[in-house]
Amino acid sequence: MKVLVTGASGFLGKTLCPMFRARGWEVFETNSSDADLTTFGSLAKYNQICFDRIYHLASWTQAGDFCLYHPGEQWIINQKINTHILSWWHERQPQAKMISMGTSCSYEEGRELSEENYLKGQPIQGLYTYGMCKRMLHIGQMSLAKQFGLKYLTVVPSTLYGPGYHTDGRQMHFIFDLIRKILLYKRKGEAVTLWGDGYQRRELVFIEDFADTLMNFDERAENDLYNIGAGEDYTIQDFAGLICEVVGVDPADIHYDTSKYVGAKSKMLSTKKLDLLFPDRRKTPLRKGLEITIADIERGQN
């Protein structure tokens, strides 16, 4: 099995690629430094390799309120990235199956986050551009499959967490920022202030669970879209309380700022479709996953 992975140096790519190699797959990793997908022809060096899979993980975004301040750039950059990879797939690698990452941001707030609703309604305003870019990627795959008989799979993940998350100064997803703040409070006494009232609900999927599910159900589905979620969500206060319990901090010391941007009030993907196809998928208990993640972050701080 020959596999090309875009965005291989990202959080998910760094977990997936070693798992692919452990299966004996031949993996070709790309990132923006060696294959700038905003430039047409950046994948030309791979033209003569016959790939079985293309895992398209690359995108231009960050967590937090990043999307609020970069909507125009997000549209142009992500459309270039996706158009170039789709063109290359169609023209040079039509035998390969493309597996791409969608986003829960594409779903309309207030509508059930189930696959048949992925293209319905409007994404939440603050995440509108990024959500629409991912919709366009999915539509591009569907269109090429319809006209040229290509094979694809779009996967929509919940927020991923686990060891190996970046610490390079970019904005962090909420769970990593929450862990970082609580650890800083424990070590240095820095006050912990969280955005919102703490009753926003979020779902997490352990990174290795997601990667394992993706690898094992890839061959069971094609030309379709699937959510990969945990099937349960918690409030931000729940996550904060559990982290405090693990590291030995009083959750009463955490403060909430209701004036700050919080995104969607609730984000939990429907996994009914996935449950039918892959009921025995791996699921790491939340506390165990948080303990592993916290330990990894603590090692990085020392």
Image (cartoon, helix red, strand yellow):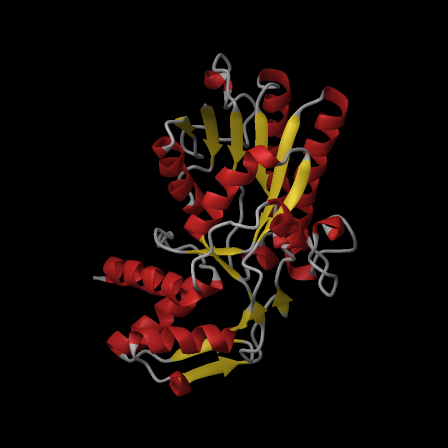
Identify the residue at image location x=39%, y=78%: 192
Extreme-left residue of the structure: 302
Q: Where is residue 128 in the image (x, y as percent from the top left)?
A: 68, 54
Identify the residue at image location x=78%, y=52%: 120
Q: Where is residue 240 in the image (x, y as percent from the top left)?
A: 43, 75
Relative to 66, does residue 93 appear above or below in the rendering? above
Which sits in the foreground, 127 or 6?
A: 6
* Quadrant hosting residue 19: top left
Q: Position of residue 252 (x, y in %)?
A: 41, 87
In the picture, the quarter occupied by the N terminus is top left
Identify the residue at image location x=76%, y=23%: 147
185 with respect to 215 (left or right) = left
Identify the residue at image location x=72%, y=20%: 148
Q: Where is residue 227 in the image (x, y as percent from the top left)?
A: 62, 50
In the picture, the quarter occupied by the C terminus is bottom left
33 with respect to 215 (left or right) = left
Relative to 20, does residue 266 appear above or below in the rendering? below
Q: Can residue 237 be seen in this view?
A: yes
Extreme-bottom residue of the structure: 252
103 with respect to 185 (left or right) = right
Relative to 153, does residue 1 appear above or below in the rendering? above
